[in-house]
Amino acid sequence: MFGLYEILNNIKFGKLHNKERVLVTGSAGFIGAAVVLELLKKGYEVIGIDNLNDYYDVSLKKGRLNNIENNVDLNKVNYFFKEISITNKKSLDDLFLKHKPSICIHLAAQAGVRYSIENPLSYTENNLNGFSNILESCRNFGVKNLVYASSSSVYGGNQKVPFSEEDPVNHPVSFYAATKRANELMAHTYSHLYGLSATGLRFFTVYGPWGRPDMAPMIFAKAILAGDTFEIFNYGKMQRDFTYIDDIVLGIIKCAEKQASKNLSFDKFNPDPATSFASHRIFNIGNNNPVPLMQFVELLEKALKIKAKFVLKEMQPGDVPETLSDTKLLEKWVGYKPNTNIEEGVEKFIKWYLRYYKESF
C-alpha cells in the first residue's frame, strides 16, 4: 500500500462541501496532522503542506500522514497534500493560486528551544523568511483568516504567573522565542496595512499521541522503556502547563472559524498587547493547570509500570522554570475549555506510544 503522502498529489478536489477550503502548513507535524484530521471529519476541504525535513525521524511524520488515511475515507473527503517548504515562495504562490484557500492555519516552523541555540540560522530561514512568504501569499491570494502558531516561549524571562496576553513580552531567552515574537509583530503589521485578519496562538507544552520525539514526554517514555538514564533539568524544580493535543486542536479550529476583529475601544495611550486597532488578536492556548515535572515522570512510571532512572542537572540555557497559561481571553473569545486532565492524557499518550513503537522493545 502506498503511504498517504505518496498518493495525495494525484487526488483532485471533487464536489465542494458546504465548508471552506483550509490550508494547513506543517501538516505532517504533531499538531498539524491532528488539525487536518479533525478538519476533514468536520467536512472541510483541506490542503496540507509540509517539507518533511529530517529535524526528527521522517518516518514518524509519514506515519502521521498514513494515520489520516486510516481514519478518513479518501473517496469522501476533499484533501490534497503536497511536499512544499514555506521557504519556497514560488511553490507557495503556485499552490495558493491553484487551490485558493480562504483560511490558512500556519503551523510549519523550525521548532525547538535548544536547537535554536545550536543553529539559529535555521530559525531565521523558516520562522522569519518562511512566515514572510506565508503572509505575502495570504495577502495576495485573498485569504480571509490566518491562524498562526506562536509559543509560550515568548514570555521569556517573565516571572509573573500565570502568563497573560496582557503582559509585556520584550525579554525572550531563546532565539526560537524571539522568532515567534517577531511573527506576532509581523502578522500585526499585515493586519494593519493590508486588512488581513490574523490570530496568534501561544501554545503551552502540547503532548499526546504522535508527539514530537524531541520533547520531554517522548524522551522520557523512550528512556524509561529502555531502562536508560535521562536528564531532568533545574534539579527537577520545573512546572509545565501540559496541554493535551485534542484540546489544542479544538481551540485552533474554533479560532479558524472566527476571524480576528478590531478592538473598537483600543486605547493607543494605554495599549492592550492582546488586541489592536487592527484585526489581529493574540491568545494563550494551554491547560491553565501547571504540573510539576517530577509528577509527570511519576505518571509515566505508573502508566509504563517501570521505575525511571534519571539524573538531576542544572537549568539549561534558554529554558524557564515554570509555564502557566491564563486562558480567560480565549475562553471568552471562542468558548475554549480544555477537557483532558493530566492523568487521562498521559494514559492515552502511553497507550499510543506502546502500540506505535511495539517493535522497539
Image: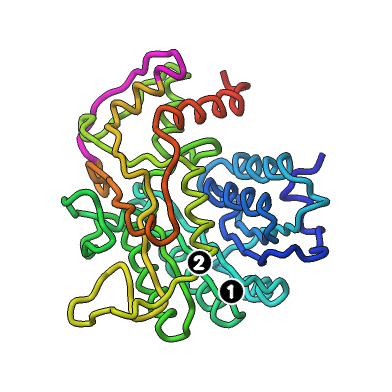
Expressed as whole percent of the image width and height from the top left, the position of residue 34 reads: 58, 47
- Density class for disc 2 (Cα within 10 Å; few <14, some 14-19, many ≥20) is some
Residue 333 relative to residue 34: left or right = left
Q: Are marks 2 and 1 in contact (CB under 8 Å)?
A: no
Residue 77 relative to residue 187: left or right = right
At a point 58% along the width and 82% down the height, the residue shown is 140
Q: Secondary structure at mark 2?
A: loop
Expressed as whole percent of the image width and height from the top left, the position of residue 292 reads: 27, 32
Q: Quadrant of residue 221?
A: top left
* Residue, disc 1: 89
Q: Is residue 255 above or below residue 63?
A: below
* Residue, disc 2: 258
Expressed as whole percent of the image width and height from the top left, the position of residue 329 reads: 34, 59
At a point 82% along the width and 63% down the height, the residue shown is 14
Residue 10 relative to residue 104: left or right = right
Q: Amino acid at mark 1?
A: Lys
Q: Amino acid at mark 2?
A: Lys
Colour theme: rainbow
Q: Is residue 345 above or below residue 90?
A: above
Expressed as whole percent of the image width and height from the top left, the position of residue 66 reads: 70, 42
